[in-house]
Amino acid sequence: MSNTFDAIVKRENSLLCNTYGRYPLAVSKAKGCRLYDLDGVAYHDFLAGIAVCSLGHSREDLAEVMAEQARKMVHVSNLFYQEPQLDLAEKLLNTCAADKVFFCNSGAEANEGAIKLARRYMHSVKNDDRHEVITLEKSFHGRTLSTLTATGQSGPIKDGFNPLPKGFVTVPFGNVNALRGAINAQTAAIMIEMVQGEGGVRPLPSDYVNDIVALCKENGILLIVDEVQTGLCRTGKMWAHQHYGITPDIFTSAKALANGLPMGAVMCTDEVAKGFAPGSHATTFGGGAVVSAVASKVLDIMVTEKLAERAWDMGEFAKAEAQKVMAKHPDKIAGTRGLGLLFGIELTFNGADVWKALLENKMVCNLTQGNILRLVPPLTIEKEDIVTFMEVLDSILSSVEIDPA
């Protein structure tokens, strides 16, 4: 590592709270599907800012929209009507079956807003004190106190933050009997991800989803779908829940919505939207002019360039290439899973050394649950990039020895 890199690390340690396990890489610029270190060395990006920069990095067309809007108006607050926000709302709602949207700044805020909306709908519209939200084991919904409690994971993510808010119940993944047993007179909603990203790239089984929908209808409770990572073409549909043919009462978006600018959204039916009223929920920055203008352009590009279809095709290509590697290393790869370009390669052993070797070979991806290589590249990734990644992975696995015991 260069002295410059060491100097940056030392500088950060003196300035920032120690909350991130940084990758041993300082990025000086990014373009398309490449990241560049301090020396200008290119890395293949299969992370995309954690499923954020779905259109690739540093696009000129988005930069132009950003600059043009910034010269007109950046921020005036949500005390005023603003057309850029309405233009975005129309485009966003045209992609789904939702009727209303609330804009915010992040995925955690969107999920927090969804929880608040579900509770307030029950209280103010249904005149019911239902407030509990059921979530699934290994889910991830954010890092605010409420979304952290909703997250179905333990360990460092929750250590030291007690007492966590009440009103959340977590049940085992895929166990409909456990889910049915958790529903009671206090249950307001069931909150799910169609594909658990942090949970190991696990798509929900179709039958299980159908059971969840049926349980919601039978018990008069709401279905919330967290589409923060899965939405906006990532899985091969504009929204992952569209693979399952369902219509959530509430669903959330963020990450890819403004391709790197902080943007989130809560979408819901007209009926559930009655739960909010002036003063009940708000945000200072949400849906500002610049991020709304950029997000509108993002949606235009996704539709025009048919990126949902492309994500599905490239995901199938990645699966086929990964299976070739799996055939050569059946003792080291247990399988692949995911939808579209939310793609996971399950190793049969702890993958920390493999992940590190990939990075050393200029391949940037994510390791989740200790043994799942998670690939969430820009949706503009080329087949050649996927082939290169799999060739590097093949080479690394050829040199890995695992304990047969």
Image (cartoon, rainbow, N blue to C red):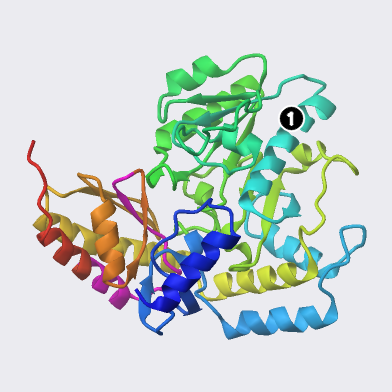
- Relative to 371, say whether 49 is above or below: below
Q: Is mark 1 on a helix, strand or loop?
A: helix
Q: Position of residue 338 (x, y in %)?
A: 37, 51
Instruction: Give me the residue at 60% from left, 21% from top.
Output: 218
Instruction: Give me the residue at 74% from left, 55% from top.
Output: 103
Of residues 301 and 200, which is closer to you in this image? 200
Q: Position of residue 382 (x, y in %)?
A: 36, 76
Instruction: Give me the residue at 42% from left, 71% from top.
Output: 6
Q: Is residue 38 left or right of residue 126?
A: left
- Relative to 133, say whether 242 is above or below: below
Q: Position of residue 35 (x, y in %)?
A: 43, 76
Looking at the rendered structure, the kind of residue marked 1 is Arg
Q: Quadrant of the C terminus?
A: top left
Q: Quadrant of the N terminus?
A: bottom left
| Residues shaded magenta | 370-390
User: What crowding class fits label 1: few (fewer than 14 Cα within 10 Å), some (14-19), or many (20 or more)?
Assistant: many
Q: What residue is disc 1 on? A: 119
Residue 152: in magenta span: no
Q: Give the residue furthest to the left.
A: 404
